[in-house]
Amino acid sequence: MQEADKLISGEKLTHGEYVRLVESYKDEHVREALQNEAVRIRSVHYGRRVFIRGLIEFTNYCRNGCFYCGINSSCKSVTRYRLTKEEILECCSKGYEYGFRTFVLQGGEDMYFTDDILVDIISSIKNMFPDCAVTLSVGEREYSSYAKLKKAGADRYLLRHETADEQHYKRLHPKGMSLSERKRCLYNLKELGYQVGAGFMVGSPGQTSDTIASDLEFLSELSPHMIGIGPFIPHHDTIFAKEEQGSVELTLHLLTILRIMFPKVLLPATTALGTAETDGRERGILAGANVVMPNLSPVNYRKEYALYDNKICTGDEAAECIENLKEKFLKIGYEIVQDRGDYPFG
Ligand code: 5AD
């Protein structure tokens, strides 16, 4: 297949070629050839090592009304919570014992967490765990705010662009949110020296091969250090409750394509992938991913951070079961390592 060959040889594809490449997931032979290449490329930069991140979901308050999200501001069934600094540090301590050297602070866009409060939390984590990386995932903020958080010690920032197609973005988000603002934030974060993560859901309502091609083109332009993708999974309390779930096969195909496009990228086998299919995360690794993000939040809050239905949060995918996860990955030939897992610059 022409597009696959072109991708493997490192050439830039046209929009139409990206569309055909995305659609080639229906062809088993193409998929297999691409997967072999993805695994080969990843082993050049990472060997058989898989990085872990401890995910701390520290607030489920959110000012936004993203139509797909189970903690959006109009979801009335959610019991809202915020973790205190002490609770967050407690999560980090536990995580440190389990071998985590990156903590991801993820939350809704909760303006209770002012710059000053976040700066205090970040610097406390950095003080207690100077050998650990801190990743933030707290949505859109001002340039000056991103700058303060960086200065306090934050190393990385996750902000999925969700879709690079204007019309599609509008289909997924309420008035007041815009793709251009999202992109502006991503470029600001990059300029400030964060390791930056973008990404999108696979199979979100209104997504087509054409919009995914735009995602691939936007990612080429941004050239992020991390890319998070996972299948869209409906949440019963959103207007997308009756929509179809995204395809696991297409997600795996896209992970493979992303690995070939961005050889060094930090690519998680996401919780959504593990939720959509029991061995989803293992399959993600086999497709080209090299990161997993087990849940480190206090167990009693986890069910309140349901971005989608049936989100896995206890059992083998949780941070406290890291030993089981290690064993599972060893069985497929991969080693979970104790490492910050920074982007390999240079
Ligand atoms: N299904 C899958 N992923 C979702 N996210 C939010 N809602 C859903 C859903 N229903 C993803 C978004 C967001 C990330 C934190 O979780 O892409 O950026």
Image (spheres, rainbow, N blue to C red):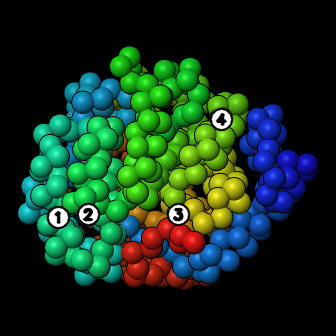
Q: Using the numbered discs, state the Cα–Cα distance from disc 2 to disc 4 in whole angstroms.
A: 33 Å
x then y, percent, for residue 284: 59, 61
In this figure, what is the number of numbered marks? 4
Q: Are marks 1 and 4 in contact (CB under 8 Å)?
A: no
Q: Amino acid at mark 3?
A: Leu
Q: Residue at image x 51%, y 58%? A: 225
Q: Residue at image x 44%, y 43%? A: 186
Where 107 sits versus 331, above or below? above
According to the picture, the residue beneath numbered tag 1 turns out to be 123
Q: Nearer the viewer, residue 226 or 54?
A: 226
x then y, percent, for residue 83: 13, 53
According to the picture, the residue beneath numbered tag 2 turns out to be 153
Q: Using the numbered discs, state the Cα–Cα distance from disc 3 to disc 2 in whole angstroms.
A: 20 Å
Determine which of the numbered discs, if any, sits on residue 214 in the image: 4
According to the picture, the residue beneath numbered tag 3 turns out to be 266
First reached walking from the N terminus: tag 4 or tag 3:
4
First reached walking from the N terminus: tag 1 or tag 4:
1
Q: Using the numbered discs, state the Cα–Cα distance from disc 4 to disc 3 in whole angstroms.
A: 20 Å
